[in-house]
Image (tube, rainbow, N blue to C red):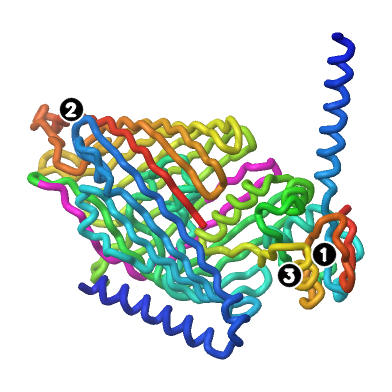
Amino acid sequence: MTRHIFRTVVAAAAVALCAARASAQDFKVVANNSVAAGDIAAADLAKIFLKQSSKFPDGGAAVPVDQGKASPARAAFSQKVMGKSVGAVDTYWQQQIFSGKDVPPATKSSDDEVIAFVKATPGAIGYVSAGAAAAGVKVVTVK
Amino acid sequence: MYSRKRTFTVFAAAVVALCAAAAPAAAQEWVDRFSIHGSISSAVGKTDGLGYLGINKDYQTNLRAVALQIGYKVGDGDRVVVQLLHRQLGTSPMQALEPSIAPVWAFYEHRDGDWTFKFGRDPLPRGLFNEVRFIGTLLPFYKVGKDVYGETLENIDGVVVSHRSSFGGWSIDANAFGGGFDVKALLPGTTENLAYAARAEQAYGASAIVRTPIDGVRFGGFIVDYSNTPVSASSHRNTSWMLSADGDWSKGWIRGEYTVFTPHQTTTGNTYEAWYGQAGFKFSEKYQVAVEHGDAKFEVDLPAPFPADHLPFSTYNGVAVNYSPSSNVRFKLEYNKQEGYLFDTPVPLYSGPQSLNPPVMGRAPKSTTNYMIASVAVAF
């Protein structure tokens, strides 16, 4: 009986761990075809999405686009790339907005809208669900 | 009257600039270029004695700060921003100086790489909280560092030039500014305390916030030199400076700020100095508890032969519990104990001469009030 409970707990923990790992990787970064880089460091990507840098490391102008706060892709992106929860990033933006410094990147409500925006906007960079089709844009690897 | 006229002029100029900038754009693009953000902070408070911060022995519900910010992106590096503010200060004498709606910001911003230029009525980068002092979702108490920030240096009519630089793990946000600003303060009187308003002009200053390689740790400084109006050859200059330090981590924070106002004038200084320290613990993203302690002193001129006295007019301790169901909503319950010589109604400052040789004026015992505030803040 005890062994059965132990096995169940271990199995549940393993499932939870796998789910968490899947969640943490459940996005891919997409960029306009004009963006030269095929990969980008997470720290550089975070600076672009926090508008602490307006350029890619190679000097090209960057136009970040976010997803809605409830988006699973945004939760995964915020945690993995910025090292913060969506709420913590939102607090950062409140400070920026009400200090008169800046406003957050444009927000799109679905993967399709992000893809359409990135495809049409030179220098645009965004993220979509890992399984989303990325036709007409380039997928950028996060280092 | 003059202030109201200037406020209207600033607001009208901002609206005209917004419309003119927006006119050529196509309809959808025009809408996309707008940003609208707001914040509401509303409170109920009660003291057990003397009135303070507009709160009295009756349950005071007329405590509010509502901010509405409208921005329009003119181009890639240019935008126009207007922020309107409505405040209700309960029974505070300072309410007399507060317009129904004030355009606290109305500026044109041009950005070029790491440089930013703001023209108009600009947010003033002073300390940790100056620009967000009314944004309740960002503050653990209804009012933060009240004796340090006071009711002045909220913005500046003029120019602010900012530059961001990074090297290694360090980054610096540096600012230089010039222009004029409103000065507001509560002054002790014999029958009633007075809400004092003046205008500072020919103000020049600089500030910087340095982020260190240690995650969450930053410090900064601010200095401004200005003349009280009307400006004349005999007008003295005044200096104010401020030091700030902040450590903010996932489980808690500790911070402190210290400020001094020094008039460079005749015999005595009437120097004002204040500081606060604050610490907090985050149980989770939703729950946190904060404590704050602050002190302020004012150099009071006394009749001859008594020397000026550094009256410790404010000492306080506060504790607050915060609940944030999301980053856009924060509920706060706080308890504060306030001691000193400056409340919403007059209290005795001096008890009379203690000795004549040497001349010493005796201070009256400090007055005290305890107050509680329950507040809710929402931002979008």
Name the residue at 46% across, 32% down: B321
Mark yes or no: residue A55 visible.
no
Q: Indicate the position of residue A134 as horizontal and vertical percent values.
A: 88, 66
Q: Is residue B55 above or below residue B117?
A: above
Amino acid bearing label 3: Val
Specify whether disc 2 shares its chain with disc 1. no
In the image, B286 versus B134, the foreground residue is B286
| Element under disc 3 | strand
Amino acid bearing label 1: Pro
Amino acid bearing label 2: Pro
In the image, taking residue B200 as reference, residue B211 lies left or right, namely right
Of badges 2 and 1, the one in the foreground is 1
Name the residue at 24% across, 68% down: B234
Of badges 1 and 3, the one in the foreground is 3
Residue identified by numbered label 2: B365
Contact? badges 3 and 2 (CB < 8 Å): no
Name the residue at 25% across, 38% down: B313
In the displayed image of the protein, which residue is found farthest to the front? A1
Magenta residues (range): B192-220
Residue identified by numbered label 1: A57
- The answer to which of marks 1 and 3 sits earlier in the sequence is 1
